[in-house]
Image (cartoon, rainbow, N blue to C red):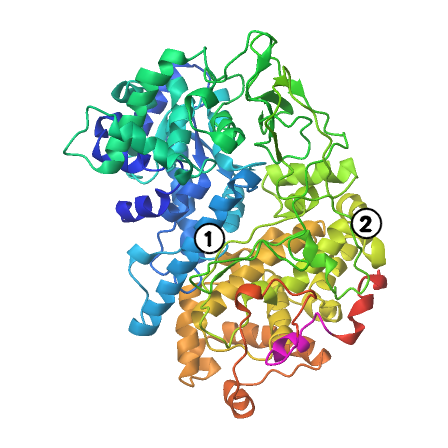
C-alpha cells in the first residue's frame, strides 16, 4: 500500500503538524528496527515474559485492507486472509499481539469527531463524482475503507484467537496505559499522540514490512533532545500546538508571537516546522524559568479556555504520572480552580477528575494528584455501585443536534441517540424518559475560586439503574464481544461513521433511515424497562433455560419486525440466516432498490453491523458467524454479478451452471419471497417498476434525522416510508406476543 496515502489520511490524528515536522525536520528520531530482534532482546532482559506489542487497531485498518477491490462493499474473504497472515507472522516469531479498538467518543473530542466525519463526506462525494465520470474504481489515493470494517475486524481477530479489547474511552489512552503497565515491546499505530505519552516505544504501522518484520521506531527522547525539552514537557507542547482536545486555532496568536520572537528561524524548513521549533524554544527558555512559581494561566493567554487546556495536558498523564506544569500553591490549593474535567466516559467512575482504567482491573488512578497526598495509591471502584455518568442532550427531539451537516455539502454525519425512541415508535408504547442531560455536563467550569486539594465528587446518572445488567454489558464491551449495547446503556448515544452513499442520488433513501426502525426497537428493548411487553434483559441475557434461546430469537426478529418470517428463517442453513433476514427486511422496507451497486453493497454491510447490535442486545440468539461478511458477501463478486444481471443474463449464467449453487439460490430466494408475500409485499423486476414509477424520491439532506416522528413529515414523494416495517398496522403489539 502507498505509505504516503496512509500518512496523508491519518496525519490529522494527534498533535497538529508533528507528523510532517518529524519527517521533514527531525528525521533522526526515526530508526529502522527489526521486531524479531527486539523480541529476542526482550526475552534476554525479561526471562519468562512474552514479548508483546499493543496494537491501535483503528490506525491499522488501511494497512490491513490489501484486497484490490474496495469500492463495491469489500472483498471480505481476502481481507480475513490478510489478517490471518498478519497475525501468523508475529506468532511465528513468538510475539504476542493485543488489539485495542475505539469503544467511545469522549465528549471533549466530539467536535473533532464531527470535523473528521465532514471531511470523510467530502471524500465520498469526490469518489462518486469520479465513478460517474470514469465508471471505474478510483486509484488507491482515493481509498475509503469499506463500511463496517472496524467492527468486523474486531470479530475477525477474535475468531483468530487474538486478545481484542474495546476501550471505555478513545483507544489511544488505554493503548498507552496498557503498553506502560505491561512493559510492552512497543505500540504499533499511526498517531503522533504516541510520541507524547510517556510509555513504551512507538512503532509505525505505515512503515511496517511484514516479510522482514522491520519498521520505523519513533523516539520521544530524541525528539526532546532536538527541541531542548524534557519528556514531561511534551503534553504541554502538544496542547500549545493543538490536538484532539485543544483546537488548533485556540492559541494561534500565541504561536505567532513565539515565532516572531524566535531568533533561530531556519530558512530551509517550512513555516509549520519553524512554529514548532519556536514554541518549543519558548517553553525551554521562558516557561521553564517560572515553572513552580507561576501557574500556566499566568504564563499563557488561556482566558476562558483554561479548563480545556488543563484537561488537554491531563489527558496525556498515565496511571501514577504527574505533570510538573500543574502548579501547587503553598496553602494546599491548586490554581486549577473549580474545573471538573472528565476525560473518561465510563459510568462506573466515582470521580470527575481525569481517570484511567486498566482493562484487566478495576483500579483507577487520578491523572493529576495532590503531591502531598498519596498519588500512587489506586482508588478502587465498586462495579456494583449505582453511580452514574452525565447523559448527553436529547438530540433528536426537535433540535436533533447530532445529525451534523456540512453547510458546504449535503453529506450527513449521523450520531444516533436514545432520543430516537422518544419519537413515534412503531411499538406504540415507547416510554418517555426524563433525561438529565446537557452536552456540557462533564465539563463544568467555575473560574472564581481555587478548588481544595482532592478531587470533587459528583453523582451523575446512567440510562439504567440495574448494576448487574450494566456490569455484564460493560464486560462484553471491553472484551469486544458486543456492539454498541454498552454505549446505549451507559450514555444513551451511539455513533455511526460515514459510508459510501451518493447524496446526489435521490432514488435510494439514506442507509441511516432504512435501519432506523430497528435501532428504535433496540433502544426500547435496552432502555424500556420491560414496558410495552418488551422482554426483560435478565431473561434474555442470564436465563439458561431452553425456552430462553427461542425467546432471544423471537426478540431479534421482532426488532426487524419479521416475527411472521420465523418459520422460513429457521429452515435456512447456516450461515445464511442473517443474510435472508436482511433481504426480507430490505424488500419490505424499500418499494424499489435502485440499481446503485456501490451503495447497495454498503447498504448490505451496514445491515450486517445492525444485526451485530441487535444480536448483542437480544443475548446472542445467533452465532456471530451468521453475520460475518466473509461468510456471506463479497463486494467485487456482487458487483460483477450485478452488471451481468443488468445485461439480462439468466440466473443459470450468473451461477455458472453450477447445480449446487442453483439449488441453494432457489431455496434462499423462496424463503425471502414467501416472507415478503406474508407482508403483502410482491417483489418486482426493474422493468415493471420503471413502468409504474417515474418520480424520484426526496433525500432528506440535513434535516433527515430531525423530524419529530420516527418517519417522514409529510410522506409525499417517499413511498418507501409508508410501506416500511415501521408503519404496518399490527406493529404496535409486536412485543406483546412474548
Q: Which residue is mark 1?
A: 117
Placement of 573 over or under 17, stated as above or below: below
Main SS, magenta region, reads loop
Query: SS for tag 1?
Result: helix
Q: Nearer the viewer, mark 1 or mark 2?
A: 1
* Number of marks drawn: 2
State which quadrant residue 119 falls in.
Answer: bottom left
Q: Which residues are magenta?
A: 714-727
Furthest-bottom residue in view? 691
Placement of 677 over or under 76, stated as above or below: below
Q: Nearer the viewer, residue 498 or 361?
A: 498
Residue found 54% across the figure and 47% down from its top: 155
- Please tell me the numbered disc located at residue 244: none
The quadrant the C terminus occupies is bottom right
Q: Decide whether residue 451 is among the magenta residues.
A: no
Residue 709 position, x and y percent, is: 70, 66
State which quadrant residue 713 falls in.
Answer: bottom right
Q: CA distance from mark 1 to mark 2?
A: 33 Å
Placement of 512 over or under 394, stated as above or below: below
Q: Which residue is mark 2?
A: 529
Query: SS for tag 2?
Result: loop
Query: Is residue 195 in view from this perspective?
Result: yes
Residue 558 position, x and y percent, is: 74, 63
- In this rendering, position of residue 91 left or right of residue 1: right
Residue 384 position, x and y percent, is: 76, 30
Sequence order check: which comes first, mark 1 or mark 2? 1
Amino acid at each position: 500500500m502507498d505509505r504516503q496515502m496512509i500518512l496523508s489520511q491519518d496525519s490529522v490524528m494527534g498533535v497538529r503538524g508533528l507528523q510532517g515536522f518529524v519527517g521533514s525536520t527531525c528525521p533522526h528520531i526515526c530508526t529502522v528496527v527489526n521486531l524479531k530482534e527486539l523480541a529476542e532482546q526482550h526475552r534476554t532482559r525479561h526471562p519468562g515474559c512474552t514479548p508483546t506489542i499493543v496494537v491501535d487497531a483503528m490506525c491499522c485498518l488501511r494497512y490491513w485492507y490489501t484486497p484490490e477491490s474496495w469500492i463495491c462493499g469489500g472483498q471480505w474473504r481476502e481481507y480475513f486472509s490478510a489478517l490471518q497472515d498478519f497475525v501468523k507472522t508475529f506468532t511465528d516469531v513468538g510475539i504476542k499481539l493485543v488489539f485495542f479498538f475505539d469503544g467511545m467518543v469522549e465528549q471533549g473530542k466530539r467536535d473533532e469527531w464531527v470535523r473528521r466525519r465532514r471531511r470523510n463526506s467530502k471524500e465520498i462525494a469526490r469518489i462518486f463524482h469520479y465513478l460517474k465520470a470514469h465508471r471505474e474504481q478510483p486509484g488507491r489515493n482515493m481509498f475509503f475503507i469499506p463500511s463496517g470494517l472496524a467492527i468486523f475486524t474486531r470479530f475477525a481477530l477474535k475468531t483468530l484467537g487474538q486478545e481484542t479489547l474495546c476501550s471505555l474511552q478513545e483507544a489511544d489512552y488505554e493503548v498507552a496505559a496498557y503498553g506502560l503497565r505491561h512493559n510492552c515491546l512497543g505500540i504499533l499505530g499511526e498517531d503522533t499522540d504516541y510520541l507524547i505519552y510517556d510509555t513504551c516505544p512507538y512503532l509505525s504501522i505505515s512503515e511496517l514490512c511484514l516479510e522482514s518484520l522491520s519498521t520505523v521506531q519513533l523516539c520521544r527522547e530524541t525528539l526532546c533532545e532536538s527541541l531542548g525539552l524534557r519528556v514531561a514537557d511534551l503534553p504541554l507542547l502538544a496542547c500549545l500546538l493543538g490536538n484532539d482536545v485543544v483546537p488548533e486555532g485556540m492559541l494561534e496568536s500565541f504561536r505567532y508571537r513565539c515565532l516572531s520572537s524566535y531568533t533561530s528561524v531556519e530558512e530551509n524548513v517550512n513555516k509549520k516546522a519553524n512554529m514548532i521549533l519556536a514554541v518549543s524554544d519558548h517553553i525551554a527558555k521562558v516557561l521553564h524559568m517560572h515553572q513552580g512559581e507561576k501557574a500556566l494561566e499566568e504564563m499563557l493567554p488561556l482566558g476562558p479556555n483554561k479548563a480545556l487546556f488543563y484537561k488537554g495536558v491531563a489527558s496525556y498523564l498515565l496511571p501514577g504520572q504527574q505533570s510538573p506544569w500543574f502548579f501547587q500553591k503553598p496553602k494546599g490549593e491548586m490554581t486549577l480552580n473549580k474545573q471538573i474535567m472528565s476525560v473518561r466516559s465510563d459510568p462506573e467512575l466515582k470521580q470527575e477528575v481525569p481517570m484511567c482504567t486498566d482493562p484487566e482491573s478495576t483500579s483507577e488512578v487520578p491523572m493529576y494528584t495532590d503531591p502531598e497526598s498519596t498519588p500512587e495509591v489506586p482508588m478502587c471502584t465498586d462495579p456494583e455501585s449505582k453511580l452514574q455518568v452525565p447523559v448527553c442532550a436529547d438530540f433528536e427531539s426537535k433540535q436533533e443536534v447530532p445529525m451534523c451537516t456540512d453547510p458546504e455539502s449535503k453529506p450527513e454525519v449521523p450520531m444516533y441517540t436514545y432520543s430516537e425512541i422518544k419519537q413515534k415508535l412503531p411499538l406504540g408504547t415507547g416510554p418517555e424518559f426524563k433525561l438529565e442531560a446537557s452536552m456540557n455536563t462533564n465539563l463544568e467550569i467555575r473560574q472564581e475560586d481555587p478548588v481544595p486539594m482532592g478531587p470533587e465528587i459528583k453523582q451523575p446518572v446512567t440510562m439504567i439503574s440495574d448494576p448487574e445488567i450494566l456490569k455484564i454489558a460493560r464486560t462484553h464491551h471491553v472484551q469486544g464481544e458486543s456492539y454498541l449495547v454498552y454505549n446505549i446503556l451507559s450514555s444513551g448515544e451511539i455513533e455511526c461513521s460515514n459510508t459510501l452513499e451518493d447524496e446526489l442520488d435521490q432514488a435510494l433513501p439514506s442507509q441511516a433511515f432504512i435501519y432506523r426502525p430497528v435501532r428504535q426497537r433496540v433502544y426500547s428493548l435496552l432502555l424500556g424497562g420491560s414496558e410495552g411487553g418488551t422482554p426483560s434483559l435478565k431473561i434474555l441475557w442470564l436465563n439458561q433455560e431452553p425456552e430462553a434461546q427461542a425467546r432471544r430469537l423471537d426478540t431479534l426478529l421482532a426488532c426487524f419486525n419479521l416475527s411472521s418470517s420465523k418459520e422460513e428463517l429457521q429452515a435456512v442453513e447456516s450461515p445464511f440466516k442473517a443474510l435472508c433476514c436482511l433481504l426480507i427486511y430490505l424488500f419490505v422496507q424499500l418499494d424499489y432498490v435502485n440499481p446503485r451497486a456501490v451503495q447497495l453493497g454498503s447498504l448490505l454491510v451496514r445491515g450486517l453491523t445492525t444485526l451485530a447490535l441487535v444480536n448483542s442486545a437480544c443475548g446472542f440468539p445467533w452465532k456471530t458467524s451468521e453475520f460475518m461478511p466473509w461468510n456471506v458477501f463479497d463486494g467485487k463478486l456482487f458487483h460483477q454479478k450485478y452488471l451481468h444481471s443488468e445485461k439480462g443474463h439468466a440466473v443459470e449464467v450468473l451461477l455458472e451452471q453450477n447445480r449446487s449453487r442453483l439449488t441453494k439460490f432457489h431455496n434462499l430466494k423462496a424463503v425471502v419471497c414467501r416472507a415478503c408475500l406474508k407482508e403483502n409485499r410482491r417483489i418486482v423486476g426493474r422493468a415493471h417498476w420503471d413502468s409504474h414509477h417515474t418520480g424520484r424520491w426526496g433525500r432528506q439532506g440535513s434535516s433527515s434525522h430531525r423530524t419529530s416522528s420516527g418517519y417522514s413529515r409529510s410522506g409525499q414523494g417517499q413511498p418507501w416510508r409508508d410501506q416500511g416495517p415501521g408503519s404496518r398496522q399490527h406493529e404496535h403489539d409486536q412485543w406483546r406476543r412474548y
